[in-house]
Amino acid sequence: MLRILAALILSLGFASLGQAQDLQPVLQSHASEIAKPSRSSVSTALDALVASGLPQVTPFLEAWTDKGIWQRDADGVFFYGSAKGSDLTLRDVDTDAETVVTTNGYTELRPNGGVRRVIGTALVQFQLSDPDITRRLSAIDSIARRPDADQLEPLLASIDGEADRALKARKIQLANFLSASFAPTVADRITAIDSLSRDTSIEARAVLNQILSTKSAVATTLPEANIARTLTPGDDLTVAEAYDRLIAADLAPPVIPPAAIRDALAANIIDGRVGGLPTAQLGTDAARAQAYAALAAAGTVAPLVTAQDQTAAAAQHVFYEVYDQDDAAITDAARAALTSVETRVAAARFADLALDALSLASIYFLAAIGLAITFGVMGVINMAHGEFIMMGAYTGYVVQQFVPDYTLSIIIALPLAFAVTFAAGVTMERLVIRHLYHRPLETLLATFGISIALQQLAKNIFGTQARPLTSPGWLDGAWVLSDVIQISYIRIAIFVLALLFLGLIILILNRTRLGLEVRAVTQNPGMAASMGIDPDRINMMTFGLGSGIAGIAGVAIGLYAKVTSEMGADYIVQSFMTVVVGGVGNVWGTLAGASLIGFLQKGIEFLNPSNTLAAQTYMVLFIILFIQFRPKGIVAQKGRAAAD
Amino acid sequence: MTQGFLVTNRSVRWFLMALALFTAVVAFGSEASGAGLVSTSLVKTLGKTLCLCLIAVAMDVVWGYCGILSLGHFAFFGIGGYAVGMWLMYARTEGIVMSSLQAQTIPPTPAEVSDAIGSQIFGVVGSSDFPMIWAFAHSLPLQLLMVVLVPGFLALIFGWLAFRSRVTGVYLSILTQAMTLALSLYLFQNDSGLRGNNGLSGLQNIPGFEQTSQATISLVFFLASALALGLGYVLFAWVVAGKMGSVVKGIRDNEARVRFLGYRVEGYKLFVFTLTAVVSGIAGALYYPQAGIINPAEIAPIASIYLAVWVAIGGRGRLYGAVIGAALVSLLSSWFTGGGAPDVNLGFYRIQWTDWWLVLLGLSFVCVTLFFPKGIGGLFDYIVRKPS
């Protein structure tokens, strides 16, 4: 007796233990609902599954909706199964033990669409509360991809239990999207829509735009509906467009195009005449219309639809756009929210544009500052400056051929590029420019000669194809502030580099002996010479410095643009403009010029985004006009260069 | 007046005689005259070179005599080419379209003709409508007027703005370069109405002369170019020789002093700038029918700088110097880049001139600027002693 009792207790204990751990008993207790589910009966089975709280429930539900569950006919036990021909691989729902059998004696569960949706909702609920965060994330992503009314409730239910803060915020956001579209009461939807007015993400805008989607329609009288707007032919749409809509709605006969008129006439030539007119006279539209009218009167062709007919037909109808959403309160709220979102987005775009402009300005600054120094101090315009930029970039490329580590190679390349172009600049100053100080226009031509020679030389050495200058890995990617505002790290690096050089140059000019002498020679070379400064040496040093900075600018530019023999030529005109607009021989002037040109170019590009060539054209025109009003640039210079 | 002018200017007489002799030799030796000593392609090259000489003379007047280093005269050259190219392209396409439409039983309406021409011309840029600037393209006289008016007007506006605000020296050069850049960037756009970077093509086929051989056409253009160069040379020689020429040279040497003497410097500069722009336009209008194609790359800023290079190498401040420079450098350039020059074998390296020509040109240009500021024309001073 005792033994029997013990066995009973033991088996009970096992049974209760089994209930806690195994899914199969739960499934068996609702076997009929699971095997032959209907939309009403399946919910009891689902409730039981949910109540069991087992981790196996989620994969089971997934498999169920995917037709991956088989039932053994003999005892009704459920398995995961995949059939291949007549072979069936079965896997136990709890132990994952695999067996291979034939499909005879097993039945695949095939829930219908309605049932699958009910299961899906339950599944979402499971996934949203899954202890594994990656599963929760994928559930959220799948909801975001295919939003559905049924997902709203499980989503809302899962918010409170969410432990991860970022995911919770995301869930709340997604719940708002869903409520805006699918909440049962109008008031709930409007509350959700209002909450979207502070969300600038692309998703939020898509939700609002979807609520505000409209259909174009045409009718004889305006129907009772949630009308977005009515269109007046002639103002909001052309008469031809209006008429096209009438044709599309089968409210008017189609227009006969000129080509069809011609073909109809050509098809009806009788004895060299059509509709009473000789073919030779049909070279005008009026004659063709007359001949066609005659044909139409005889009933041979469809009558012509004249422009008057089109206008009259358009006037007899109302053209309107109607919201897909019937409730005006919702569309009003959505429109208000969208307006508010768009204002925020516009502000964010503006900030993004300003960042872009800033990075462009720093590139121009880097490219132009060397030019500005040489021009300002020596009154010499160096047409080969662009080629010094190119030289710097190629130096970086060559260094990368020897030093495979990108970070290290950039650190080596920057000073090396400075050294190479410094040497090139000093050589050029000694050999050519020194002899041409009193003929500034000829310096321009001589340096141009050097520029084409250097460019061709680079082409001969490195070939015509672009060479890559790869940036280190930590400069890849972009700093993303929001969906709208983002800026790549390379551009930030260039900005920092430009700031660094601004500081360095100001330091050199204002705090060092060289700077003092450079400023003295700039202001009055004769007086400086009588004070014991050697203008020759200063000129040489200045030219070297300006060229060296061009080399560093070359490395910086090469990091985000391709290195070609023509890259200098792309920047040289822009650099000239920067110098001329900013005012010669002044660091602040160059900074102002670069900022003006950078912001201007981005501004014009923003107003005319499809056409960057047009933007550049307008910018050059603007600069030409600007020079009219400030011929000496923003910061006018006093001293030697100011005299010419 | 002109008779007396020619008598007093020996260099003009010499130049005209040399030009006439050269023209006669080429004309009688050409394939069109039956001799066949000068090939048609060479006649074309020489005719184009004469047009380049003409714009170089204009450049010399504006730079060598007036001291304005304009880096924009090739833009005017290009505008002239575009203006005449529009008519050539329109008229030729019209001929083709008309002959294909004639085949239909019903004669075409004007709208159909214009549509067909439009889609032929602008098909490459995905359009078929005629832009506003093609309004006169159907008429040769109007379009020839454009050759003169558009560069003249542009130069007038630009020059007025620039000279009025006393932009001089390097600034002015950069400003003219900016103008050229703006124009070429504008023309590079597909919706500029001038077929974007495709440019205008097929210009060597002259409408109405389809049956005439290219040999004859090229000879006619060669003669026309020679005539234009002769006339342009005499015109500019006359401009720089008289009292006005003295003022212009004075502006070059010391602008402020001329202004203080009471001359309206801006007016003189504007006149010279505009006149040379107009002549550049005419040179372009003669050049591009011989070249056969024009595209925006032709008027990129670099082309105008080359123009200055020719004049500097030839010798500034003397008109024949500009002619020599333009002819020499452009012919040498096509000889070297066309593979005409033999490679130089250095043993360890083989110099291929197609690659090294620009290096040579650049360096020789530096040398000319440094050591021969008077250019090749300066050599004539050693031959001809100027009466003191």
Image (cartoon, coloured by chain):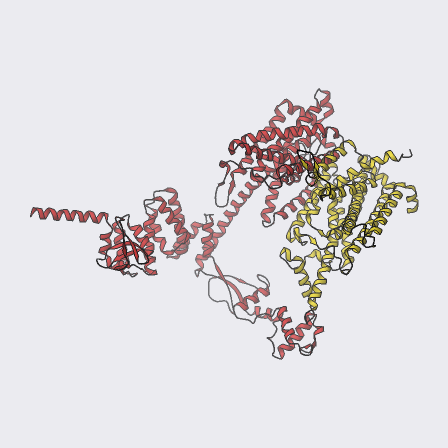
Chain colours: A red, B yellow
Residue at x-position 65% and y-position 77%: A294
From the top left corner, tell me how far across and down residue A488 is, in percent.
Answer: 52, 40
Q: Quadrant of residue A575?
A: top right
Counting the numbered discs, the total is 0
From the top left corner, tell me how far across and down residue A99 is, in percent.
Answer: 27, 52
Residue placed most toward the observer, A160 or A221: A160
Residue most extreme to the left:
A1
The reply, left or right, for residue A83 in relation to residue B153 is: left
Q: Where, quadrant-wise, is the C terminus of chain A in this rendering?
A: top right
> Is residue A498 shown to the viewer in this render?
no
Compared with A83, A173 (above or below) is above
Residue at x-position 34% and y-position 57%: A117
Q: Quadrant of residue A531?
A: top right
Residue placed most toward the observer, B11 or A483: B11
The reply, left or right, for residue A247 in relation to residue A440 is: left
Compared with A536, B318 (above or below) is below
From the top left corner, tell me how far across and down residue A253 is, in percent.
Answer: 56, 72
Residue most extreme to the top:
A532
> Is residue A136 shown to the viewer in this render?
yes
Residue most extreme to the front:
B347
The reply, left or right, for residue B75 in relation to residue A238 is: right
From the top left corner, tell me how far across and down residue A59 is, in percent.
Answer: 31, 50
